[in-house]
Image: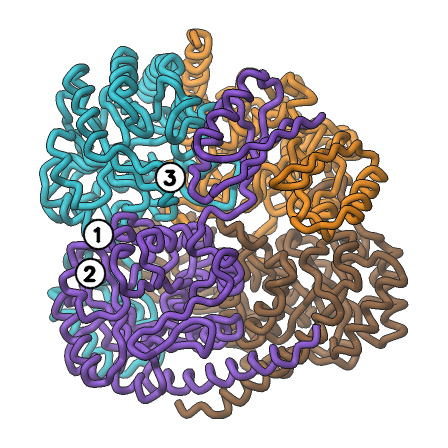
Chain colours: A brown, B orange, C purple, D cyan
Amino acid sequence: MIVLIKDGAKEEQVRQLIERLESFGFQVHVSKGVVKTILGLVGNTARLDIDLIRSMEIVQDVKRVQEPYKNANRKFHPEDTVITVGGVTIGGGKPVLIAGPCSVESEDQILQVARAVKRSGAGMLRGGAFKPRTSPYSFQGLGAEGIRLLLLAKEETGLPIVTEIMDQGQLPFFDGVDVFQVGARNMQNYELLRVLGTLRKPVLLKRGFSNTLEELLMSAEYIMAGGNEQVILCERGIRTFETATRNTLDLSAVPVLKQLSHLPVVIDPSHSTGMASLVRPMSLSAIAAGADGLIIEVHNDPPHALSDGPQSLTPEAFDDLAKAADLVFQAVLAGTAAMTS
Amino acid sequence: MIVLIKDGAKEEQVRQLIERLESFGFQVHVSKGVVKTILGLVGNTARLDIDLIRSMEIVQDVKRVQEPYKNANRKFHPEDTVITVGGVTIGGGKPVLIAGPCSVESEDQILQVARAVKRSGAGMLRGGAFKPRTSPYSFQGLGAEGIRLLLLAKEETGLPIVTEIMDQGQLPFFDGVDVFQVGARNMQNYELLRVLGTLRKPVLLKRGFSNTLEELLMSAEYIMAGGNEQVILCERGIRTFETATRNTLDLSAVPVLKQLSHLPVVIDPSHSTGMASLVRPMSLSAIAAGADGLIIEVHNDPPHALSDGPQSLTPEAFDDLAKAADLVFQAVLAGTAAMTS
Amino acid sequence: MIVLIKDGAKEEQVRQLIERLESFGFQVHVSKGVVKTILGLVGNTARLDIDLIRSMEIVQDVKRVQEPYKNANRKFHPEDTVITVGGVTIGGGKPVLIAGPCSVESEDQILQVARAVKRSGAGMLRGGAFKPRTSPYSFQGLGAEGIRLLLLAKEETGLPIVTEIMDQGQLPFFDGVDVFQVGARNMQNYELLRVLGTLRKPVLLKRGFSNTLEELLMSAEYIMAGGNEQVILCERGIRTFETATRNTLDLSAVPVLKQLSHLPVVIDPSHSTGMASLVRPMSLSAIAAGADGLIIEVHNDPPHALSDGPQSLTPEAFDDLAKAADLVFQAVLAGTAAMTS
Amino acid sequence: MIVLIKDGAKEEQVRQLIERLESFGFQVHVSKGVVKTILGLVGNTARLDIDLIRSMEIVQDVKRVQEPYKNANRKFHPEDTVITVGGVTIGGGKPVLIAGPCSVESEDQILQVARAVKRSGAGMLRGGAFKPRTSPYSFQGLGAEGIRLLLLAKEETGLPIVTEIMDQGQLPFFDGVDVFQVGARNMQNYELLRVLGTLRKPVLLKRGFSNTLEELLMSAEYIMAGGNEQVILCERGIRTFETATRNTLDLSAVPVLKQLSHLPVVIDPSHSTGMASLVRPMSLSAIAAGADGLIIEVHNDPPHALSDGPQSLTPEAFDDLAKAADLVFQAVLAGTAAMTS
């Protein structure tokens, strides 16, 4: 970390600042230039509150040389993290398809969808039981009953289950669930992250729709700081001025996150676009960008879905997509193998 | 609510849609034009899931004629809501100043600040005890001990207390607190909103930094739907591409919210700008825009604050600001009184 | 177009409005419902100023049923537009690679790059001669001399030339240029668009970094309204709160634009990301999304480039990318051919 | 300017970089720390292309210590710039009201409005003659005839004229115009800025709706670099995700710009909000924030305006606003005079 001192700061003040920084456990190297006095801090700056330094009287600015996260950082963990969920591995290999309805609606619905996506090669089953909805008057999900139905589907198909947790009070219902999903609106619900960090079950962490990638990694760090290293990052669209799509899918997030972190990255093309007709091109696009998986809404009867019908694929369209995704993945592999530079 | 039917929809399909809408309790009026078939719905459409309608097969688009919130809506409650907190009233009158440090740090600090802002005319004391921080390694607040210190300051000065709750698990510590603050990151933490809706204590609800004003009102609706009508709306800056300020303070939010809703609106010029030098102009600006209050960070020793020092005012600067804010408020009143059109 | 009338509007006022709308050449169909009085307009509403209608006293809102552009609209031109530039076709087939340096710097540089990208299969040569720079003190490009050098490279390699025009005063220098590029900052420079509409040479129109896709199509419409139908749309990243990349590449733009319009769509992965290491994944991603072409910065010596070095590929990396892009394109084709639903 | 060298850079490479920087005319001070090697540059870094430095092979990052603009910078020109236009002064004193219709429509209209706003104390008359419109099918303004009518109004009322120029080809029509307005869409039309920089007539430069304040100042710098020091900065709303207002008025821009620059700052509350009912509160808010002027749309008959009727004030509402604005300005002055800290 580099600390720029304000012009006109007194010797005495600089000395006091250095002492304070040393009291935090850093080695401090001073360089007095003609342009600026600069302090270089050596030590674990990821564990330092940068705002605290910035707020000091004689500090003009602070510049991190290292990222503010450590457990999630590829620098300290160069190999891809591979997470195994019920026999399925995610991270650093063939992309995993996580598919299922936006909301669990009935036993019949979830079983039909589960069987269909299993046949098409999905690796996990997704489905909403506890649903965060903008309006208190919208359908809020089947709750605990929804999870019971997901577990029925798991029993029949063997597919591991991914479903959203909104509050630690819901934890008792999640016993048989394989992966906790943290939704975009809760990405910075730090109490929830902290609790999930104390568990030893994978967490699929969705990027908040106006959070930076660094903030996403910081939220992963909250979970990992508690000892739970199994975090799957998920890009699901960010909020911009554009209204043609529900959100703007930021696919650059895939290579950026994979440079910065060793955690697996999955893409949600359904919520980000909000339109079924965009799910296929954006899915293929995500695979080509290097995503480790896709989380896709599939409904046996989209026009009668209780939520998000317009963005759900039919099982047939999902089957076509699964085949095409594999072709694109193979093409990218072949392209990489042929690289000369 | 107006429902546009897709071109080419069959008679039979339209009939089925009408029956379904009627089954939700609406009267449906059909107008078949040359351009479009349009359905008009009469009934309490605020309680309807618009996505559900939009997802129906033959529906091209849905247009609300009414807002999707009812309890928070000025149409159904034309008079300003006035909330009384420990003898202080907020809403529809003289703006209330809510002041105090970002974080409670010590008994000495909070008492000094409380006495000072009381002298300058603040109506409530703010201070963070449970702090949502981007990094798990940053100072997380004094927690329950912080609330104990706030209550000491309340006892001495008589100032009602506003402090943030991040999770319902923290509720037991909030007994003596006068106003729950819900932070920007939790504006759509629906479980928390739901619990606060069952209580009968005012909630200061901060706008998420990428939430629309309609979403803010929907989150207020979550609280009010539970029977807690005492919601104070707070604009604290939104996330944009601009980097000169920490966030972009959206002061248009004041007149827009006051047109749409009867709830009081307060402005946070400290977090939105992130710079003490901008707090005064933005505070006066907020008063001129019609805000019912300001929530301002004041610290007895900003350069040594444990969080957000650079945006904190000294007690002296706050005193100057309080006087100027009153002058501007009186000027706006006089201007309104002199209106001829 | 559907016009909602305000509650409480008088019979007489509605009659006057209808007459005014009829005077613009529309048929007006009235439907008086219990909920709302609604007018349906039949006629060429693309040629109507929607703001004019919205501003009328008794109008509550106006909703387009048709898009506000006509020449660029796929509804009126279902087949993909194919543009031929010096023997190279763009649109609806194999993606075209447009490659070259950010700025033309010297004869040696442009010839080296041109030969290299030609060998790797590029279809056109790009290079900046007139450069729009944020600072008046930055290198502004070689201007007319830069175009002369581009034409030398064209003569030698046969590659058609794409280069940016910033002002109609520069037109005399563009004689031998094959495609005018309109940069993001000039997407709504309507005088420039109007002039280019009177010519019969293709225009590569870049999306402004905060313009919606509808606005991009409206700017294309400006050019096409003048009779120049050869417009290539280009997505080059939009401005968001994210700082990890220079801009956020909106790849959903590809399928959205191709649904709305028949014009070819190309992607600029270099400017949008600002980092060479992201160009390859984003290029493959764009191809998988269905792009008709890529416009990529290639420099023979990136570290010594006079502008945008950090985002330029070496000729070797471009060669690798060209091969991989072809593999991905073939995979997408195969996936489409295998579709059953 | 501070240049961070990448870890692992060789002695020889650092030496070459230093030589290159010295060849640009800088003094270079090296500090080799344990953390990082850092170069400090002394000299006129405002005139340096920062991207050029950043693109160099061994450079990790570059941090400006000085702003990239010089003529517009308050550091080099501490006093407020005061611009005199036809006897009216703008900058550093009483705010100036610039009022008039969005578009000039007829002699009768512009004369009526001009007389009315003059009576209410407006200092300048605004009105659009050349109009940048999103659609080629919208009303494009009266052009040269519009300017002729503005000059008639000037002759009768003595009010100086502010009107928009979109292209240097329109210059011949602007002889009698007192202030060139550069619209938001042309803020980075550098050819236009360059030409205006060669003239000696004030320019009212509107912030592009997705441009940062630094970019606005860089565009001012383009004009000033040509020798035309008379630039008036104008904030008119930026593009965000919020849809309740047309754009988000960034009032923090006022104190930020006034800290960074000596140029006058005016606010456009009409275009930013798009709604007449928000113009009054946002105008008073702008005055309280310290704006040097307001540019407000006034129309004698808003419901029949040919453009932007919904955001125009009636002459009566403008008169009320002018009085209230003065009261608020006096209150702010009194508040400042009473400051003790």
Q: What residue is rendered at 55% in x and 85% in y? A: A331
In this orientation, which residue lies closer to the viewer: C79 or C169?
Answer: C79
Q: Residue at x 16, y 59 (%)?
A: C170
State how far apart marks 3 and 1 are (Cα): 26 Å
Report the amino acid beneath label 2. Answer: Ser
Q: Quadrant of the C terminus of chain B?
A: top left
Residue type at numbered disc 3: Ser
Q: Is residue B264 above or below residue C128?
A: above
The residue identified by callout 2 is: C138
Q: What chain does mark 2 sit on?
A: C
Q: Are marks 3 and 2 in contact (CB under 8 Å)?
A: no
Q: Which residue is mark 3?
A: D138
**In the rendered image, residues at marks 1 and 2 fall on the same chain:** no
Tag shown at residue D190: 1
- Front one among C151 and C105: C151
Taking depth in this image into account, of B232 and C8 the one nearest to the observer is C8
> How many angstroms separate mark 3 from mark 2 (CA)?
37 Å
Q: Give residue D81's quadrant in the image.
A: top left
Number of marks present in the image shown: 3
**Residue C262 on image: x %, y %:** 46, 63
Position of residue A159 measured from the top left corner of the image (x, y, whole percent): 81, 74
Give the Cα distance between marks 1 and 2. 12 Å
Would you say residue B17 is visible in this rendering? yes
Residue contact between numbered discs 1 and 2, judged by CB atoms under 8 Å = no
Q: Chain of mark 3?
A: D
Q: Chain of mark 1?
A: D
Whether residue B110 appears in this view of the structure is: no
Residue drawn 46% across the image and 51% down it: C214
Quadrant that contains the N terminus of chain B:
top right
Which element type, helix, strand or loop, lies under badge 2?
Answer: loop
